[in-house]
């Protein structure tokens, strides 16, 4: 038992050297239990700072990812517009493709990942991706759960699809 206490004290002294240590005079006045409590609190502060830094780094990386995705989306939209203008006529868009376009637009506007929406809607990630790309036709129940996961009613989502189709025909 005494060796464990000595090991704890050695570890606590190492933490004191690493972290912001109280003055030596103040540490001498503390009982061993109080010293351990101070060391524990210092360790907690160090760990909290590390966790905050990791969280900030993840948020910054996510922000960069969204900016890159937005830029890529803009480039793709410009190239599609140029291609349509060069063809001279607008291409017919299926209802399946229009729904997928609107769902992806809603998801990216809300800065949600495919994983977040798929988990909330109870749909597999791969299937949701195929619906967004216009490769799969989702049932009305799935469209309803996906819409709710995006914070909309099915009717609101379908109105947006209708507006999108109108904008293409114009």
Image (cartoon, grey):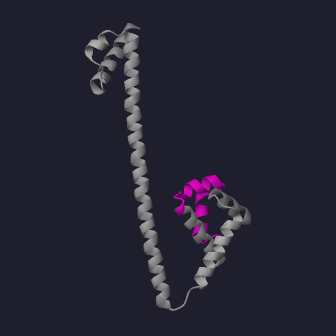
Residue 26 visible at all:
yes
Q: Is residue 124 covered in magenta?
A: yes
Residue 92: x and y, percent?
60, 84
Up/down of 26 relative to 46, above or below: above
Q: Is residue 49 covered in magenta?
A: no
Residue 135: x and y, percent?
60, 72
For image coordinates 41% across by 38% down, the residue present is 51
Would residue 2 appear left or right of 133 to someone viewing this image? left
Q: Quadrant of the C terminus?
A: bottom right
Up/down of 56 relative to 5, above or below: below
Q: Quadrant of the N terminus?
A: top left
Q: Main secondary structure of the magenta part?
A: helix
Residue 138 visible at all:
no
Q: Residue furthest bottom?
A: 88
Quadrant hosting residue 19: top left
Would residue 17 appear left or right of 125 to someone viewing this image? left
Residue 116: x and y, percent?
57, 54
Would residue 62 appear left or right of 23 to someone viewing this image? right
Residue 139: x and y, percent?
72, 66
Q: Which residues are magenta?
A: 109-136
Quadrant hosting residue 134: bottom right
For image coordinates 46% across by 89% down, the residue present is 86
For image coordinates 57% across by 64% down, the residue present is 106
């Amino acid at each position: 038992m005494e060796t464990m206490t000595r090991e704890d004290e050695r570890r606590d002294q190492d933490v004191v050297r690493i972290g912001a240590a109280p003055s030596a005079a103040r540490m001498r006045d503390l009982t061993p239990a109080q010293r351990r409590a101070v060391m524990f609190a210092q360790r907690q502060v160090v760990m909290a700072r590390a966790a905050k830094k990791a969280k900030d780094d993840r948020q910054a990386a996510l922000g960069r990812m969204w900016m890159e995705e937005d830029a890529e989306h803009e480039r793709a939209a410009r190239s599609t517009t140029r291609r349509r203008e060069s063809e001279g006529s607008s291409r017919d868009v299926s209802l399946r493709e229009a729904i997928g376009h609107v769902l992806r637009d809603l998801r990216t506007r809300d800065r949600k990942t495919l994983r977040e929406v798929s988990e909330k809607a109870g749909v597999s990630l791969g299937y949701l991706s195929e619906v967004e790309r216009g490769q799969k036709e989702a049932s009305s129940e799935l469209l309803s759960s996906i819409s709710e996961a995006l914070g909309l009613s099915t009717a609101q989502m379908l109105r947006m699809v209708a507006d999108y189709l109108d904008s293409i025909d114009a």
